[in-house]
Image: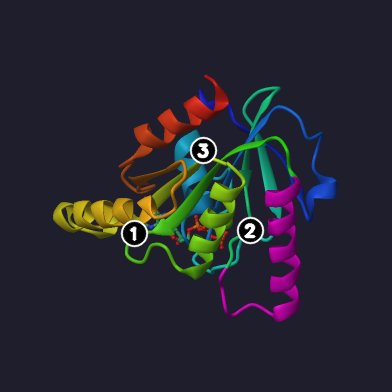
Amino acid sequence: YYSQVKFSISAPDISHLGPDEGIEIAFAGRSNAGKSSALNKLTRQKGLARTSKTPGRTQLINVFTLDETRRLVDLPGYGFAQVPLEVKKKWQKSLGEYLQKRESIKGLVVLMDIRHPFKDLDQELIHWAVAADLPVLALLTKADKLKSGKRKEQLLMTREAAMAFCGDVTVEVFSSLNGIGLDQLQGKLDEWFGL
Ligand code: GTP
Ligand code: MG
């Protein structure tokens, strides 16, 4: 089903987005965490969302439509130091605005590199989502980088840490390289989308 996703628009801020209706699920996370790659894996479309070795590739809010009422949103990454302050300010503002004002957002996927999850800004974002009663799926990306024992260890550790948020926070591992966790991601999106 997700292979039918189509690119809709790139918006510099929320005023350029379409009508705030239907269901939107957003992908957020640090720059280089693998947001765009995860979207491409999910939709089986290699070039749908632009990926890059250079952090900070996605600077706009990119919207993809699944059908008339359902959308996926690739948000600008945060936490990348080597970007001019002005640029950083602008895109963090659009990220904050999106998360605070967009009513159609019904779920937030927070992507974090499995080797260093829950950095300050990740925690801040999840705290905010929990306070706003927004369900969160924390996705530990690049799981292919760890052997299965270490991977499980990181998953259990992060699940334990996630309990501290006292909200609807699920943690799963994911790899856009070999498809680990793709079923779990799809299952959660289906649930949020009411599919
Ligand atoms: P920004 O748009 O800058 O915020 O980054 P992003 O979160 O969209 O990351 P992107 O998907 O562009 O991936 C960043 C880099 O990590 C690229 O070089 C990807 O090839 C690599 N990468 C992403 N996902 C995986 C993964 O699951 N496994 C491995 N090994 N590499 C990955
Ligand atoms: Mg990106």
Residues drawn in magenta? 79-101
Q: Which quarter of the rendered image does ligand 2 occupy?
A: bottom right
Q: Is residue 92 magenta?
A: yes
Q: Earlier in the sequence, mark 3 or mark 1?
A: 3
Q: Position of residue 90 (x, y in %)?
A: 76, 68
Give the spatial CA distance, label 2 vs label 3: 20 Å
Q: Is residue 141 visible?
A: no
Asked if the stretch drawn in magenta spans residue 112, the answer is no
117 and 159: which one is in front?
159
Q: Position of residue 79 (x, y in %)?
A: 56, 70
Q: Which residue is mark 1?
A: 114
Q: Residue at x 22, y 54 (%)?
A: 151
Q: Which residue is mark 3?
A: 45
Mark 3 residue type: Gln
Q: Residue at x 78, y 56 (%)?
A: 12
Front residue of 147 and 3: 147
Q: Disc 2 on helix, strand or loop?
A: loop
Q: Which mark is residue 184?
A: none
**Residue 150 relative to residue 115: left or right:** left
| Residue located at (79% from left, 49% from top) | 14
| Numbered disc 3: secondary structure | loop
Nearest-to-viewer mark from 2 and 3: 2
